[in-house]
Amino acid sequence: KAAPNGCPISARAAAFDPFDDAYQQDPPDYVRWSRDDEPVFFSPRLGYWVVTRYQDIKAIFRDNITFSPSIALEKITPTGPEANAVLASYGYAMNRTLVNEDEPAHMARRRVLMAPFTPEALKEHEPMVRELARAYVDRFIDDGRADLVDQMLWEVPLTVALHFLGVPEEDMQMLRQYSIAHTINTWGRPKPEEQVRVAHAVGNFWQLAGRILDKMRQDPSGPGWMKFGIRMQAECPDVITDSYLHSMMMAVIVAAHETTANATANALKLLLQRPQAWRAVCDDPGLIPNAVEECLRHNGSVPAWRRIATRDVTVGGVDVPAGGKLLIVMASANHDPRHFDDPDRVDLLRENASDHLTFGYGAHQCMGKNLARMEMQVFLEELSRRLPHMRLREQAFSYVPNTSFRGPEHLWVEWDPSRNPEGTDP
Ligand code: HEM
């Protein structure tokens, strides 16, 4: 079988399957062959062109007119009529947010909504993040073991995200189920019997987002990015539409917390698997800001993102026809030796660590990147100060099978509580 441009499909391209556990476990290793030999290939299983080298991916991010982000939140696996009917029964109408909006609408909206992301505005959130991180560590510090994902890394970023958005704290466990359903619905390959269950959860999430929005509209005063958005709607209703607010309310709850929870779990796993690196962080917290960048580079939480070609175009020497969908694997770009020396090594002092593409690049680059960085730094500071003697337990790591949201579902660590440098934090 040939690719849409008429070129033959190699055996490795034909076998590429991002829902396979091998991709989840180590995305850059899974596509090492492509980075080396076939940096742009057509995946017949996915129906996407897959791009794996740093320069090609950066060039795609840089040109959001030729490479439109409009498919960023489209279901990567089309669902069957039964699941579609379930979604329709909830009035599900996820549409344009920011991440999947084309120009000129995108930039107009992004500008109007930028103020709460300035460094000064973000500074206000740090004390809360630290307080929460300390309180959660207090809960398990005397136990000698913890699943950091279940006992800290899921809930704290979710609380911070809701606070940042101005959303009252909702049932955390329910939101966790909804978020996972949204991830599977958008970036996964649910089996037909799973599709209906996922559709109900996504439908409920959509309706919950609508209720939260209605409540906020009654009194949009006070802090919070979504409240800010509602206030801005009064000034520029053509830019901040009702559809935008509803779609964003659902999408951003996931974008603002799951990404950060996963990134922190990935970072801790990476460091604890290299006791020397973990020791270095514990001995010198000044290393933490660059360590966060290096972890985001080496083991980030958004391994791949999507674009669609709006015209015939050549990518890395391969002709991609107009309408061609692209899966751009940032996790692979981040391990490209053409840009990063000895890319598989964890180097806490790496000078260009922050060149990673985990937050995307260009017009759509993640607006929340500095909030995420701050959270990750606080988590590493608190855990390295209070549990420098923790180590990973023997365990198999599992991931929700999908292309774009990646972090271990559990992260078990253990330590000797009699050696705690301090007990419960004062
Ligand atoms: C966009 C990753 C945390 C809000 C994006 C994009 C990526 C990404 C890959 C698309 C970039 C592109 O198309 O060029 C991440 C990662 C995070 C994180 C890895 C954590 C480690 C957050 C947080 C927030 C947030 C905490 C917010 C509160 C957004 C928004 C956009 C975005 C609003 C859309 C920007 C636009 O299209 O103009 N993020 N994100 N993200 N992210 Fe994040």
Image: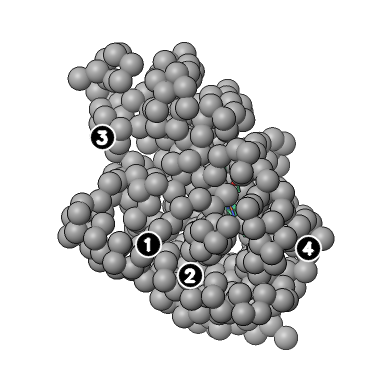
Horizontal relation, residue 227 to residue 309: left or right: right
Query: From the Cβ of disc 1, is ligand 1 less than 8 Å away?
Result: no
Q: Is residue 91 visible?
A: yes
Mark linked to residue 45: 3
Label 4 neighbour load within 10 Å: few <14, some 14-19, many 20+: few
Q: Nearer the viewer, residue 148 or 354?
A: 354
Residue 104 in the figure: left or right of residue 391: right
Q: Which one is in front, 421 or 124?
A: 124
- Which quadrant is home to the N terminus? top left
Q: Amino acid at mark 1?
A: Tyr
Work out whether mark 2 precedes mark 4 in sequence or the reverse, and give the earlier one. 4
- Which residue was labeled with disc 4? 121
Q: Residue 41, located in which quarter of the rendered image?
A: top left
Choose mark 3 or mark 1, whichever is in front: 1
The amino acid on which the numbered mark 4 sits, given as a three-letter code, is: Ala
**Contact flag, marks 2 and 1 (Cβ < 8 Å):** no
Which residue is at a point 39% across and 47% down the rendered structure image? 74
Tag 2 residue? 209
Across the whole image, how many numbered discs are drawn on residues?
Answer: 4
Sequence-wise first label, 2 or 1: 1
- Picture coordinates of residue 38 (x, y %)? 39, 20
Between 203 and 259, the one nearer to me in the picture: 203
Residue at left offset 26%, top offset 29%: 44
N-term-proximal mark, 2 vs 3: 3
* Distance between mark 2 and mark 4 Cα atoms: 25 Å
Identity, as a three-letter code, of the amino acid under mark 3: Arg
Quarter of the figure that contains the C terminus: bottom right
Q: CA distance from mark 3 to mark 1?
A: 27 Å
Q: How is the image coloured?
A: one colour
Q: Earlier in the sequence, mark 1 or mark 4?
A: 1
